[in-house]
Structure formats: structure tokens, C-alpha cells
Image (spheres, rainbow, N blue to C red):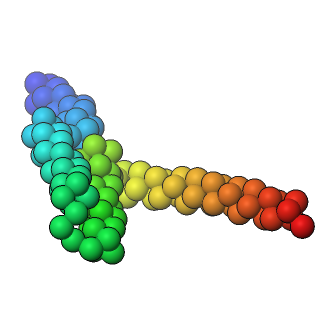
């Protein structure tokens, strides 16, 4: 009976451990925070110094911004394709982002077109 109880106890702790691992660790949050700060400081310095052309600065800010979005999704929202739950969460996030982009984008388009029609 003791063997059955220990097996049952270990089986009950497995979901709790898996759930705890999904939420990240202090190390994960510290790495994400440091990367976020670095990815914020670099574009700030590029813009403030003005050593590069406007096109180079603009593309640098855009690329570093996209990298920072990835850092936030990975280290703070813990989106990944490793586990089934992570994959489902990632697809849910992407679907929600698509809907938001469509609603905002189409709203701006409708407002712009309505304004253009009112001017004629």
C-alpha cells in the first residue's frame, strides 16, 4: 500500500511541477528584463546621437522593436511551441492579435474613407 501511495503522490505532483515550469523562473525574468533594457537603450542612443542616416536609424529601431516583441512574448508571456499547451497559447495569442489588427486597421480605413467622402 505504501508503494501505491507514493506513486499516487508523485503522480499528483507532476501537473503542479509542469504548471510551475510554465510560469518561468527568476532567471528567466531577469534575462528578459536585461534584454528588454538593452533593446530599449540601443535605439534610444541611435536616435539621440544621430550618427546614422534616417533610413538606417528607422530600420534599426524597427528591427530592434520586433526583437523586443519576441523577447516579451518568450520571457514574460512564456509563449512557445515546445509543449502542446504552449502551442495552443501561442496560436490563441496570434489569433487575438490578428483580430485586433483587423479591427483597428479596418476602423482606420473606414474613418479615412468617410473623411475623404465628406471633403468632396
Residue at horizontal 25%, vertical 38%? 23
Q: Position of residue 92 (x, y in %)?
A: 48, 53
Q: Considering the image in quadrants, where does the N terminus appear? A: top left
Question: In the shown orientation, is residue 24 left or right of residue 91?
Answer: left
Q: Nearer the viewer, residue 22 or 106?
A: 106
Image quarter of residue 45: bottom left
Q: Compared with residue 8, is residue 30 higher up or lower down, i.e. above or below?
A: below
Image x and y of residue 108, in percent: 68, 57
Identify the residue shown where x is 33% and y is 55%: 69
- Front one among 20 and 75: 75
Rendered location of residue 87, percent (x, y): 37, 58
Asked if one can make out residue 11 in the rendered structure from this viewpoint, the answer is no
Question: Is residue 67 toward the left or the right of residue 106 in the image?
Answer: left
Q: Which residue sits at x=85%, y=62%?
A: 119
Q: Quadrant of the C terminus?
A: bottom right
Residue ID at (22%, 63%): 50
Q: Is residue 103 visible?
A: yes
Near-viewer residue (8 or 89): 89
Residue 32 lies, in percent from the top left, at: 18, 46
How many numbered discs, if any? 0
Amino acid at each position: 500500500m505504501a508503494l501505491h501511495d507514493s506513486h499516487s503522490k508523485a503522480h499528483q505532483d507532476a501537473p503542479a511541477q509542469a504548471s510551475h515550469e510554465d510560469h518561468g523562473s527568476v532567471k528567466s525574468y531577469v534575462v528578459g528584463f536585461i534584454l528588454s533594457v538593452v533593446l530599449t537603450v540601443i535605439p534610444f542612443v541611435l536616435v539621440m546621437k544621430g550618427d546614422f542616416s534616417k533610413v538606417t536609424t528607422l530600420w534599426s529601431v524597427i528591427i530592434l522593436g520586433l526583437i523586443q516583441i519576441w523577447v516579451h512574448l518568450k520571457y514574460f508571456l512564456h509563449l512557445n511551441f515546445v509543449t502542446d499547451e504552449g502551442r495552443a497559447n501561442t496560436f490563441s495569442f496570434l489569433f487575438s492579435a490578428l483580430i485586433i489588427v483587423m479591427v483597428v486597421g479596418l476602423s482606420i480605413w473606414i474613418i479615412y474613407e468617410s473623411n475623404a467622402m465628406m471633403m468632396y
